[in-house]
Image (tube, rainbow, N blue to C red):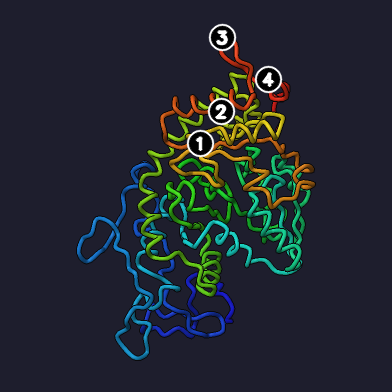
Amino acid sequence: MSTPPTNGNGSSSTSKPSNPLKRVDLDGHDLPPSPAPSSPRNGRRRYALATELVYTESKDQYGASSVPIYQSATFKQSTAQGGQSEYDYTRSGNPTRTHLERHLAKIMNANRALAVGSGMGALDVVSRLLRPGDEVITGDDLYGGTHRLLTYLATNMGIVVKHVDTTDAEGVRSHITDKTAMVLLETPTNPLIKIVDIQTIARAAHEANSKAIVVVDNTMLSPMLLNPLDIGADVVYESGTKYLSGHHDIMAGVLAVNDTELGNKLFFMINSTGCGLTPNDCFLLMRGVKTLAIRMEKQQANAQAIAEFLESHGFRVRYPGLKSHPQYDLHWSMARGAGAVLSFETGDPAVSARIVEAARLWGISVSFGCVNSLISMPCQMSHASIDSKTRAERQMPEDIIRLCVGIEDADDLIDDLSRALVQAGAVTVTLDGFHATGAAEEVGKAPLTA
């Protein structure tokens, strides 16, 4: 396999000047046509984000208001030499994918965006920048799939992975060495809803090692609420399956960067492995993105009401929209909203299981970001790939319940949750209402700590 392109425009002195679309790598081997760079035609956002999410630019020959699905694996060329057209093979580029990527670059405040088959696929692409002996510094409260991939890299690929408390920016700085190739962050963390100071850590990482790249998983907030590239991140990735799509009917992942060379390297990996998002899924993701603002607005309002409801009835709730969250101020210094994922504790895994199973409107499922509300016990589901010993070391309560709030009527969601709490025996019912009881009451009295 030829080496990845490293210069700014992906060309070299051996490029044929007669064909501006012709590109070669550092070894002089032809690269396939590419939609790179997938930058928005008119640069960064010009309107409010809610408007930009809906407003798209298209040069469709028939003036289609919705981008067509180019369901074609190959594209005809005009001569035997090939390479005259922007596209030749969908693994390398497709008009539907280009349209989506340019739109994503605009809303993510990026110079380039790339779409792949899943959120974990996006992280896999980033991880291919690593070499044996490289160090990765990351959090001790991670999505289970991220933990699984990092464990594989550490076990089989010679990558050194350090799990640290990323809420302690100075602590993170102390772990950075000349071997640190990547700092991988999530905020809010999942499921403990801890807040990470991206800006401070990014600055510290770049000062300590200029070669280190800061990678942020922004899935929990989406571009609607946070743009990590604006505050120091080098690479941002998201699971497009979640808020960007919003309906849990596709799998997708998104990458965004500002650095041209870094973008070229990531595209090289995507083209080499063939993990680019399919045209049909690009169409569906584009359709979902257009309603992100209105969905997120409703989901956040519902999440705030539910978090306040649970807290007022004596439960310990983890949600950055509550002033009781120890990192409330830090979160709002970076983000434009609190998101729609929260968690609470009962102190007893058996009680938690009964609550989850008693809910009717809340579907028992992994994932989040969907229009439907979901409920789960992360230690048994999304984070089960993290062994119980490690979960205990990272202070992840086995009883924690995660609520991923949808767009239903808030009163209906609260009524359904109330019935589940009563049915599970998690509350004491009185003439004045009900309140957390037993272990849940004791846990609720202990404040959250950063």
Question: What residue is shown with label 3?
Answer: 432
Verify CB contact (< 8 Å) between mark 2 and mark 1.
Answer: yes
Question: What residue is shown with label 4?
Answer: 437
Residue 154: % across, % down: 75, 62
Q: Which is closer to the viewer, label 2 or label 3?
A: 2
Q: What whole-number distance in Å separates the C-alpha atoms at marks 1 and 3?
A: 26 Å
Choose the circle earlier in sequence order: 2 or 1: 1
Name the residue nearer the viewer: 320 or 143: 143
Instruction: Give the residue type at disc 2.
Output: Ala
Choose the circle earlier in sequence order: 2 or 4: 2
Disc 4, SS? loop
Name the residue nearer the viewer: 85 or 143: 143
Q: What whole-number distance in Å separates the C-alpha atoms at marks 2 and 3?
A: 18 Å
Q: What whole-number distance in Å separates the C-alpha atoms at marks 2 and 4?
A: 14 Å
Residue 46 shows in the view: no
Name the residue nearer the viewer: 358 or 104: 358
Residue 237: % across, % down: 54, 54
Q: Residue furthest bottom?
A: 80
Q: What whole-number distance in Å separates the C-alpha atoms at marks 4 and 3?
A: 15 Å
Choose the circle earlier in sequence order: 4 or 3: 3
Q: Which image quarter is the N terminus in?
A: bottom right
Verify CB contact (< 8 Å) between mark 2 and mark 4.
Answer: no
Disc 2, SS? helix
Residue for point 64% across, 43% down? 378
Choose the circle earlier in sequence order: 1 or 3: 1
Disc 3, SS? loop
Question: What residue is shown with label 1?
Answer: 362
